[in-house]
Amino acid sequence: MRVGVRAREAIAITLLTFLVAATTSLVHLAQLSRVVVEEEARQADLIARQVSAQASRALASAPGRDPRRILRQSPELRSLLDATVGISPNLLDVMIADRDGVVVAHSERLKEGATASRRLALGELLAVDPVRRLATLARGGTVYETSLPITLNAQPFGTIRLGVSTTLLRRELGAALRQSLIVTGVAMVLAWLVAMALAQVVLRPLRALVSDVGRLRRGELLEATPGSQAGPGRRDELGELATQLQLLGKQVESDRVRMLTEKSTLRQMVDHLEDAVIFFNHEHRVLSFSRSAESILGAPLDEAVGHALGDLLPAVHPLHALLAHPLDRGATRNRTITLVGDDGEARDYLVSVWPVKDGERLIGAMVLLRNLQSIRGVQSLISYSAKLAALGGLTSGVTHEVKNPLNAMMIHLEIVRSRLGSRTDEVGRSLEVIGGEIRRLDRVVQGFLKFARPQELKLTAVDLNALLSSITSLLEEEWRPAGLRVDLALSPGLPTVTGDEELLRQAFLNIIQNAGQAMTSGGMATIRTVLDESGSVWISIADEGVGIPAADLDKVFKLYYTTRHDGNGIGLALVYRIVQMHDARIELTSQVGRGTTVTVSLPAR
């Protein structure tokens, strides 16, 4: 029984879909198990902190009394212990144990006064590999715990322990497993139907391709002809295609003779190369060279072919020494040389010499001369692209490492707020402050991501004097306790510049903040603006800080370069990018121990 390509493709796609669905389901369960355990750990930590706060209030209400008795008899603490076990679906018990492990307060009162049994930490369940974690949750019957130490009069008193049952956690994975099995079954049925339809669609152009290849071989592109017979041992469409390709291969083999006639075309291609290419035989006689090499050899191709290198170039020319070694030893050699062109200008070339062999016999050499000026331009572009790539990686890192925790904090803040209800006391106000700060930090992160990504400038007329004044007014209060001062020397009547006000604000804020951070013992930051004769606005920001060594001046604007232990090396790199986006210039001068001056030049509007 012959199984056609259509059936084989459908079977293969179905099996592949099954493998993908099964693998995805396992990965999903593994990830879900971690998420479930992490979520339970977060909730347990939150409950432990609530219990700790309530215990602290109970102890503070009766100073001097037996703390164990106070915790055991506190009705508020007792209500909290009972409520937490009822609220959390996976929480088995909650207890407070002293340093000796004796249970002081327990959600099950009968266990108070007994010695608490040792349990595995819930963090150990997160530390194991996904397979072992899934197996542990599937077995059930194990109790893990999370703990939080509590203190009394600044001395360790005991711990708050919360027991989490894997049997209860397993229920959350059961629903996900059933859903994955249903999705896998549906995916296999749909995959079979899609595979059958796709196979039909794929085979239609394949048959047309077989017919086209045959007509190409015979030169009958416009004439419809029936398909050829199947190849030996094959009775499907692939056999037909193989037969046609074999015939086409024979035709290509016979066409190799035509390659000799394409020598002139190859010659034209070599002539259009920017790099100079010269071919020599083993006697250093010129065989051929590109048009760009004429200025180096000093003669056109027709006159130079067949002449020895010594007839065309002086004896002291560096090409003589380069050709001697590869031809004698059969080794590749690279060197940078300086040649003076017809215009009298000296140019640096990277010269590479390759020996040309016929088997083991050396028959000549090929010399490639590349102008280093173009290479350096490409290297500069690559370096700038690497910085942009690094900034993109940083953006991705900020997205995952900052925004995700912010979202988690906001979610849990809402959980705490919902559990505490509408409160106007200090706790409620603290929650509002925390929420406001989280939202503010989220806006900061969003602003950074918006800036780090490629964007269009929002050009407006910017008053630099007003911009710098607003920045310094924000920093003066922050700087005053550290002995830092600002001297504004703003030129009156300064014209506006065309730029993105928010990006310019970010750039100058970074520069001024760096100036303040450099003055560890206090000092003056002098900010000046001036309009030069060419119509450019100059902004200089000078500090009296520690200064920058001369060897490090070229590294200041590189991404991730920083001299502070708590710095990230982003600020001045972002400044440099903003300046480039505005077609402006930035210069930096510094003396160790005397300070640093950063000057930005922007074209006036």
Image (cartoon, helix red, strand yellow):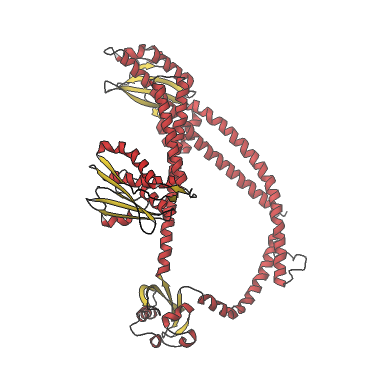
* Quadrant in the rendering for residue 283: bottom left
The quadrant where residue 109 appears? top left
Q: Residue at x 66, y 48 (%)?
A: 11
Q: In the visual, does 598 lie left or right of 27?
A: left
Q: Is residue 499 left or right of residue 207?
A: left
The foreground one among 586 and 190 is: 586
Q: Is 430 drawn above or below residue 224 in the view shown?
A: above
Which residue corresponds to the image point at 47% horizontal and 38% vertical from the top-left? 130
| Residue 486 position in % (x across, y down) | 29, 43
Q: How many marks?
A: 0
What residue is shown at x 44% (from left), y 37% (from top)?
A: 442
Q: Quadrant of residue 244?
A: bottom right
Q: Is residue 284 above or below residue 44?
A: below
Residue 99 in picture, x, y percent from top left: 30, 22
Q: Residue furthest front?
A: 493
In the drawing, does residue 282 fall left or right of residue 154? right
For the question of whether residue 94 can be seen, the reply is: yes
Vertical position of residue 218 compared to residue 415: above or below = below
* Vertical placement of residue 215 versus 505, above or below: below
Is residue 51 or residue 338 the one in the foreground? 338
Where's residue 239, x and y in %? 69, 62
On the question of residue 235 being in view, the answer is no
